[in-house]
Image (spheres, helix red, strand yellow):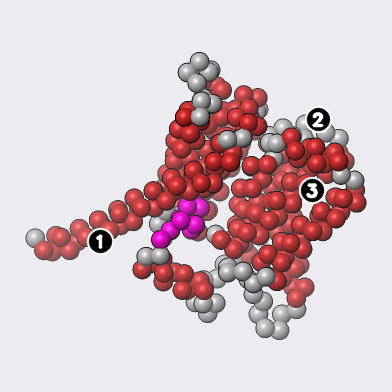
Amino acid sequence: MAAVDHKERPERERVNRFLVGIARGVAGALLFSIPMLMTMEMWFLGFYMERERLLLLLVLNLPLLVGLSHRIGFEHTATWRESARDAIVAYGMGVLASALILVLLGVITVDMAPREWVGMVAVQAVPASIGALLGRSQLSMRDDDDSEDDEEEDDPREAPNTSYATELFMMAVGALFLSLNLAPTEEMILLAHKMTAWHALGLLTLSIFLMHGFVYALAFRGGHSLAEGTPGWHAFIRFTLPGYVVALAVSLYALWTFGRLDDLGTAQAILTVVVLSFPAAIGAAAARLIL
């Protein structure tokens, strides 16, 4: 009997850790998606957004969640199968949390056509599902396992190696997370309309140097310090500039997804992408610090 209890205890602890991770995920989904759940432009996207673009966004979000879960899921995952499980759970929590809040706010009503409320929930579920996975890294308590992990991360000698592709992936996640909140708004187009080419050049330069300073010059926790003897321009060329290109690409995709570039000329579209890439670059840099 004691032997059975001894075997059941690790399984019970594993289940408890997973349930705690679920609770953190729900909290993360609400915490990170509330601004979008209470934004009018995000509601209306469910009415008029092209279904092909919405479907593409939902499809692309799944591998993004799998990759993010493999890095920071509800619990430490050893296989891609476990990461896929966490990603699906996060997606489900994003859907349920978004639907619940939109119903409670009176945005979704019984007289609405199914196409309308399905569209609204689907759009909101993308940032909510990302927030659910972010809940582990941002809302986790310092238990014994997490404390050991944090000590390893704080000690550069014990920190796990991160591949270059993973670095760029995490930048894309951070850029997308902030872009989804701002891309549907009219302010992006309005700001671009007010700007000249010189304004755009200045904003682009500021975005790049803020991004570089966020991670390296300010030496925040999670930043990437340079090895002794490495020239300062190495990090700028290898990480900061490619990171800004990632932010530009994510901004372009987000604006295209929400139809914000459809009626714009080439010059105006470029200015709009530059405007959105400012917060996207900050999100990309912050992702490397907190994820």
> For the residue labelled by badge 3, is the local secondary structure a helix, a strand or a loop?
helix
Residue 84: x and y, percent?
45, 49
Residue identified by numbered label 1 = 10
First of labels 1, 3 by sequence position:
1
Q: Which residues are magenta?
A: 133-141
- Proximity of marks 1 and 3: CB atoms separated by less than 8 Å: no
First of labels 1, 2 by sequence position:
1
Q: Is residue 207 above or below residue 177?
A: below
Magenta run includes residue 187: no
- Proximity of marks 2 and 3: CB atoms separated by less than 8 Å: no
For the question of whether residue 242 can be seen, the reply is no
Main secondary-structure element of the magenta-colored stretch:
helix
Residue 41: x and y, percent?
65, 32
Which quarter shows the C terminus? bottom right
Residue identified by numbered label 2 = 263
Residue 4: x and y, percent?
14, 60
Q: Specify whether 159 is left or right of 242.
A: left
